[in-house]
């Protein structure tokens, strides 16, 4: 008999494994402490994966597949992947072991090492999900010093003939409409009501609590609102096309105190669990737009396509090109601890309070909240990237290491020294004020610099540039700000640094 392992983020209904039912195949899935405990996860993340895995198992059995499934409290569950596999192999007289290539380095290594110990045949398979292989991006940038995402994105557009007129000319006359994707939302156009599933996950919540799994965040067990079946994932995609796409691009960078989701799709969990395929998501969105080009501008669609066809595939390529060393890079030599309020939202800074509270309540924040609020503050306070990685990997429902660590350690914290981002994404309070309504309800004043009620981002920003001068002196994209720093009055800079250091030394007082 053949044993096939399916991991919790390999829920691809269209995988070639399932095209034909084979009575000589046993599928194995398991909820394990190995996976709940390697970092502290958001409770909604744990529930979403377990629920999705259980639903996938129901689907497999509906297709007459032979499945062994270990719930978290199953009597035979050793809570360790290798121990469980050994047990299944012995019990079922398995003659061959097959698995789909994991997307996380730690699991990839664990399974490779395991297969080397086996006396039976083993074979790995592609997950048939991504639009690139693990090595495509490394091959694309071979011999290059910079790994510019935009060039890779253009290559992907051509390769998959996405929004192309000819093999060289993109629709709309340009490749990137990013300049059109930076509008602030001030109450109009109206945001459609959130798509609700309102599922009861009380049983799963009780299981996690009874097993004493350490989690973070909050959950309403009677109104769980994330897609955990392929059908629900498709309904989120359909809802995005019909109600949110029309304004997605315009306001994808906007932040608002009263609106958590704005026009974002919230498809990332369904995609990262592989309930939805990126190609079908892209084709569905483009197909919907083509029928309504008089209503929906190309900039709305291109901004969405860029995130999936460009950024998502690019980040995965960087991960496999640079791991495992990438997990240790700390180019800026930052060493501080992450403030306690990242787990409580107990801070007078309204932007951080809102973004962190939302993260804890919903296991969600969109990319600008992650990059320019929580990530920006962590970098300006020179937090160790290990601490930042751990928080982001745990708190967000869509966080799997291949996509989290490259976004966090690379894009957000500049810890890789410029592999992903050509400059650090830091700002004073002015950017936050420009893109959000957070500053209006804040205890601190964005217009002030060094006073006790001055926005902390203002002094932290200039202190950061001064502290890291050596790292940025040859960075062309930082030259304007570094020149301004050099020309700044000495006493003014000293006052900014005094204020910043007080914040860094006692972050939980602010």
Image: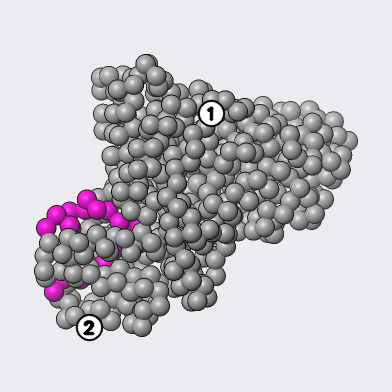
Q: Quadrant of residue 149?
A: top left
- Foreground pick, 19 / 158: 19
On screen, residue 506 versus residue 241, left or right, reads right
Q: Is residue 455 left or right of residue 171?
A: right
Specify which label sits upstream in the sequence, 1 or 2: 2
In screen coordinates, is 457 left or right of 331?
right
Tell me if residue 163 comes above or below residue 203 in the rendering. above
Mark drawn on residue 90: 2
- Residue drawn at 80 percent across, 54 percent down: 509
Q: Circles 1 and 2: CB distance less than 8 Å?
A: no
What percent of the width, then of the height, locates residue 319?
A: 41, 51
Give the percent coordinates (x, y) of residue 455.
77, 39
Nearer to us: label 1 or label 2 = 1
In magenta, the rendered stretch is 1-20
Q: Which residue matches tag 1?
A: 190
* 110 versus 15 height, above or below: below
Residue 101 coordinates in the image, percent (x, y): 29, 59
For mark 1, give the secondary structure: loop
Identify the colour scheme used: one colour
x 50%, y 46%: residue: 407
The image shows a total of numbered marks equal to 2
Picture layout, residue 497 above or below residue 447: below
Magenta: main secondary structure equals loop
Is residue 495 visible to the viewer in this orientation of the structure?
Answer: no
Residue 3 can be seen, yes or no: yes
């Amino acid at each position: 008999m053949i044993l096939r392992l399916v991991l919790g983020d390999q829920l691809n209904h269209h995988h070639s494994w399932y095209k034909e039912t084979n009575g000589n195949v046993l599928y194995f899935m398991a909820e394990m402490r190995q996976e709940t405990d390697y970092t502290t996860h958001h409770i909604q993340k744990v529930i979403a994966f377990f629920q999705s895995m259980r639903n996938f198992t129901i689907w497999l059995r509906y297709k007459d597949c032979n499945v062994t499934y270990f719930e978290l409290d199953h009597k035979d569950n050793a809570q360790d992947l290798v121990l469980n596999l050994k047990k299944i192999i012995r019990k079922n007289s398995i003659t061959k072991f097959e698995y789909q290539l994991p997307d996380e380095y730690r699991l990839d290594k664990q399974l490779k090492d395991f297969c080397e110990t086996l006396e039976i045949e083993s074979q790995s398979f592609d997950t048939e999900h991504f639009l690139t292989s693990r090595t495509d991006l490394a091959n694309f940038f071979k011999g290059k010093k910079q790994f510019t995402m935009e060039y890779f994105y253009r290559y992907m557009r051509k390769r998959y003939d996405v929004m192309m007129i000819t093999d060289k000319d993109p629709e709309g006359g340009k490749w990137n409409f990013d300049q059109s994707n930076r509008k602030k939302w001030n109450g109009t156009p109206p945001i459609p009501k959130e798509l609700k599933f309102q599922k009861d996950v009380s049983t799963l919540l009780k299981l996690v609590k009874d097993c004493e799994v350490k989690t973070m965040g909050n959950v309403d067990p009677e109104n769980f609102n994330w897609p955990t079946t392929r059908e629900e994932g498709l309904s989120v995609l359909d809802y995005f096309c019909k109600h949110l796409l029309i304004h997605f691009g315009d306001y994808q960078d906007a932040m608002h105190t009263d609106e958590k989701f704005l026009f974002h799709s919230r498809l990332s969990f369904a995609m990262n669990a592989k309930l939805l395929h990126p190609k079908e998501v892209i084709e569905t969105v483009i197909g919907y737009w083509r029928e309504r080009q008089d209503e929906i501008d190309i900039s709305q669609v291109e901004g969405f396509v860029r995130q999936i066809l460009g950024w998502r595939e690019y980040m995965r390529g960087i991960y496999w090109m640079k791991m495992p060393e990438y997990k240790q890079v700390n180019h800026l030599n930052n060493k501080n601890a992450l403030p306690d309020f990242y787990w409580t939202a107990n801070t007078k800074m309204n932007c951080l309070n809102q973004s962190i509270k939302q993260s804890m309540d919903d296991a969600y924040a969109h990319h600008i909240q992650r990059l320019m609020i929580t990530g920006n503050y962590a970098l300006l306070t020179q937090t160790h990237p290990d601490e930042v990685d751990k928080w982001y990997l745990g708190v967000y429902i869509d966080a799997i290491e291949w996509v989290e660590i490259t976004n966090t350690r690379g894009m957000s914290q500049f810890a890789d020294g410029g592999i992903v981002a050509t400059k650090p994404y830091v700002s004073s309070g002015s950017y936050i004020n420009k893109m959000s309504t957070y500053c209006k309800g804040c205890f601190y004043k964005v217009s002030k610099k060094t006073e006790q009620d001055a926005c902390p981002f203002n002094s932290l920003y200039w202190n950061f540039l001064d502290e890291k001068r050596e790292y940025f002196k040859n960075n062309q994209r930082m030259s304007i700000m570094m020149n301004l720093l050099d020309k700044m009055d000495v006493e003014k800079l000293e006052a900014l640094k005094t204020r910043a250091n007080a914040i860094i030394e006692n972050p939980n007082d602010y």
